Image (cartoon, grey):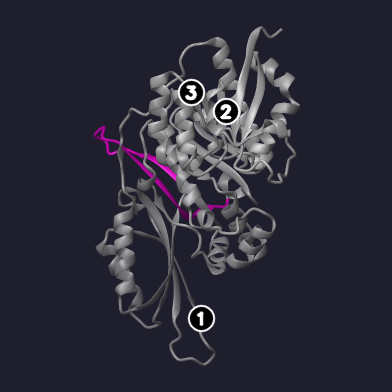
Amino acid sequence: MIEYRNLRIGLLGAGNVGSQVASLLLEHQTELAERAGAGLELVGIAVRNESNTRRTELPRELLTTDAESLILSSDIVIELMGGIEPARELVLLALNSGADVITANKALLATHGPELFELAEQVGAQLYYEAAVGGAIPIIRPLHDSLAGDRVKRILGIVNGTTNFILDRMYTSGATLEQALKLATELGYAEADPTADVGGFDAAQKAAILASLAFHTVVPLESVYREGITNITLAQVEAAKAAGYVVKLLAICERIEDGTGSDGVSARVYPALIPEKHPLAAVHGAKNAVFVEAEAAGDLMFYGAGAGGIQTASAVLGDVVSAARRHVIGGPGIAESRHANLQILPISAITTRYQITLTVVDRSGVLAEIAEIFRNHNVSVETLVQSVEGVTGEANPPATLVIGTHEASESSLSATVADLAASTVVETVVSVLRVEGL
């Protein structure tokens, strides 16, 4: 029997996710209360316009345009507005009022996370954000709690469903990027303006959050290296497939050790080749997955729906129950562990592998000149595949070289590519992709 008073919940935003959260809160009120140990009363839903038509019908009496009054009368505030402002201002108001806050706003956390977590700690409130990365996939709580006593070495994440759908469609059906993007838009996976997804911005925000959490260090969004998938061609995807690789847009968060105790953190997003045998290669469609490499726990994989109203609502409601339990038990919120203060490293500091595709003049001595460029930068060649393609009867058609390197520093590899591009024997640097997951 529940003896604790009802907890008042204010919801900010009634979009796709917000509407689902409200609907599930109302539909499963009794069951959720039994799990939480207190009644959960949805007291209001702040919207911009009460008369707007919504995908999920909500009780009209709960809708309000007065977000501030709703916040000040709530014990728990759920922010699902998205964007930076007014979300930041309203979350600050909620925390200052002593309310716990639940958010799925990755942009807000990636940009203003330290400010919000610091305020929550000062006032003894709690900021929950399981739904901010990976949708329904439980990844925040495992990193925050289950792996808090371990040493996370690296995270490889497919954290954007739109780009994964596009690249997977190119791989499985032979569609071009433009064709796959068009289908993703028709199916509702891509927005009318897909820049945040295909440009890697969405994944970079999530990488900043994951890296900050995994390495107990504030990782600013502006320090996350970012490349999108807009330059990926079907030819690259097919060449990767022939070589036993899959192209994926990866968010990579890595602890880099220098042997002296001055460890650093790298957070980056780019399209990369991963071996077909790697678990992430089997992540198809618009699914998300996060692969964690930990010192003691070993390799862990979290897989599931990375977006969608009801899927993301599942993660939000998990945070609601956690927040309610904290109220019942009492005591201040648990502060974020962001005090390791590891150095944030630039992309040039990482070590990786490259697959470089070149067209070169087809004459004797070319391979020797190419090899000399690699030798000058101490980069070792692991594989080399050569083919000659040209118009029938053409004299000296260009040759294509696909060169795979051993592991080397990013700075050495990028310098190698620059010298290749400037070489008189190289006609074109067709593509450069990093290789991960080996």
Q: Nearer the viewer, mark 1 or mark 3?
A: 3
Q: Residues within 10 Å of mark 3 (few under 14, many from 20)?
A: many
Q: Which residue is mark 3?
A: 126
* Cα separation between marks 2 and 1: 68 Å
Report the magenta residues as a range. Answer: 252-276
Q: Nearer the viewer, mark 3 or mark 2?
A: 2
SS at badge 1:
loop
Q: In the rendered image of this protein, does residue 1 appear above or below residue 207?
A: above
User: Which image quarter: residue 300?
Assistant: top right
Are the two marked residues, 3 and 2, in contact with CB atoms closer than 8 angstroms? no
Q: Residues within 10 Å of mark 1 (few under 14, many from 20)?
A: few
Tell me residue 312's x, y (percent): 63, 38
Q: In the shown orientation, is residue 433 left or right of residue 44?
A: left
Q: Mark 1 or mark 3: which comes first in sequence?
A: 3
Residue type beneath disc 2:
Leu
SS at badge 3:
loop
On whether residue 271 falls in the magenta region, the answer is: yes
* Cα separation between marks 1 and 3: 62 Å
Q: Mainly helix, strand or loop, the magenta region?
A: strand
Mark seen at residue 70: 2
On the question of residue 337 being in view, the answer is: no
The residue depicted at 64 percent of the width and 29 percent of the height is: 44
* Cα separation between marks 3 and 2: 18 Å
Q: Mark 2 or mark 1: which comes first in sequence?
A: 2
Q: In the rendered image of this protein, does residue 428 appear above or below residue 293?
A: below
The residue depicted at 57 percent of the width and 34 percent of the height is: 66
Q: Quarter of the image containing the N terminus? A: top right
Between 434 and 54, the one nearer to me in the picture: 54
Q: Which residue is mark 1?
A: 389
Q: In the shown orientation, is residue 80 left or right of residue 1?
A: left
